[in-house]
Image (cartoon, rainbow, N blue to C red):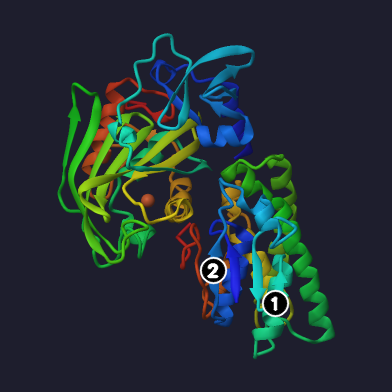
Amino acid sequence: MAQDRGALMTELCNDPVMLEHWHPVVSLEELRRHGRCRTMLLDRAVEIVAQGEGAVVRCEAALVGSLVQYGYVWASFGEAPKPLFAVPEFDEADRRFVVTGVFGVQVSAGRAIENFLDMGHFPYVHAGILGEEPHTEVKDYDVEVSQNRDEILATRCRFYQPKAAVSSDAGAEVDYIYRVPHPNCAVLYKSSPMDAARLDVIYIFVQPMGQERIRAHTGMCIIDDASSDLEIRSFQQTIFGQDKPILENQYPRRLPLDPRAETPIRADKSAIAYRRWLASKGLRWGVIPAGV
Amino acid sequence: MKLYDFELHAECYAARLMLSLLGVPHEVETVDVYPEAAHLTPAFRAINPLGRVPVLEDGALRFGTVQGILAYLAAAYDTSGQWAPDTAVLRGEVAGWMAIAAELAATAGQARLIETMFAQGDAEAARAGAEGLLRVIDQHLWFGEVEGRDWLCSAPHPTIADIACFPHLVLSEDGGISRQDYPAIRRWIDRVKRLPGFTVMSGVFATSSAL
Ligand SMILES: [Fe+2]
């Protein structure tokens, strides 16, 4: 392991796909708490310093492009990164925005996103919360790549969950929509136990520190005026803590993009679409490209 | 009885595990440790001046270290007398392994906090310290198996010393410490998991995966 780390650190990411994207580096909440944050992005050490309402990001002494959105500072080494994806729910005033924490995980960003999209592991890894035997079947759902928005959309997902959210008081069949609007970010919409007409938003914004090392930023934007921030955070941290050892025991740690490299157990449609979408972008960093 | 608790904290898990093994009814008050650092606020320091979880409250009594909590629970609520045995030899052994548990917290536990929750510190140094301890513990358990001893101390049953060490060992991979080279530790982890009243935490599963 020590050897792997050494080998990976000698080379800096030069993948144009990664360099041209915005990446989350720190939540405003964490930045306000500490004033500054030293972390890694794409193999480079970066420092984020709070400034007014926003932040300044530096790599060595040089300024790095940055913006503030969705409660996070985002940075890019690119010349002209395209605007960050839209999540309009962040602007709905009656939603609770709760940062549930940032966790270091020894895994590639692609593996983390794929796990986030996978419903099949719920009854086994999140038993009694997001799933429960014998309700193990993943019912058929739809996946499309939205051309005009360049994102993956999985709709009509349904799963029986004993405790779908902190505010749930009974098991229920829960509707899910997944969006993957960025190679390392995914947004999940699920039925709100508090408001039948609206959907709760749960996000994972992955900061790729290296090819096999991430900071996973998670949080929620939900309709819930009863639960405390602490209850919401504890619920999500318990779930993420359950995923972490599963993520870290996946080999190879980088995501194989060759469709024949791994047979996902049920040839999971969203995983296949995600890998194909990454391959179509020409991504080579943090993945095992097809044909290698 | 009340436990001030944080789910992902290794030493809180030791306290929860002991309460579960002894079947002691209690309430839990979650402290917003990460990322809010609520354990360092003046309000929480009024409960535990050390600014640490876990804290156990039993009536007017309060214990603010995991060693104190485990020793108290065993002395006060273990009718079997097994968890903190009273013989000279076992008292010495338990005290010794409780000290090792604290060293595991400072090494394997610290590596986990650095890697997972971005605590300050030198992860490589913490891992190096932990590997030295794991090597000794693995040997001790391996020779124990040869002699028919299943636990850290020489009693034919587990003690609070096993419970104090368990969270740091079962969570070692979070800190980048693989247990691949410590087979006797892996078998001991399985034995702990089979104890009546065993309880999991987020990231620890009831049965070991086939790793
Ligand atoms: Fe999961």
Q: Secondary structure at mark 2?
A: strand
Q: Is residue A197 above or below residue B197?
A: above
Mark number, residue A144? none
Mark number, residue B28? 2
Q: CA distance from mark 2 to mark 1?
A: 16 Å
Return the x and y of residue B197 as percentages of the image width and height.
52, 79
Instruction: Tell me the subunit letter for badge 2.
Output: B
Q: Amino acid at mark 2?
A: Val
Instruction: Tell me the subunit letter for badge 1.
Output: B
Q: Is residue B45 above or below residue A92?
A: below
**Is residue A215 shown left or right of residue B98?**
left
Circle 1 sits on which residue?
B60
Return the x and y of residue B30 as percentages of the image width and height.
54, 61
Q: Amino acid at mark 1?
A: Ala
Q: Quadrant of residue A45?
A: top right
Q: Tell me which numbered mark, 2 or 1, is placed earlier along the sequence.
A: 2
Q: Residue at x 80, y 72 (%)?
A: B95
Return the x and y of residue B184 as percentages of the image width and height.
63, 65
Return the x and y of residue A98 as percentages of the image width and height.
43, 44
Say if residue B141 shows up in the picture. Answer: yes
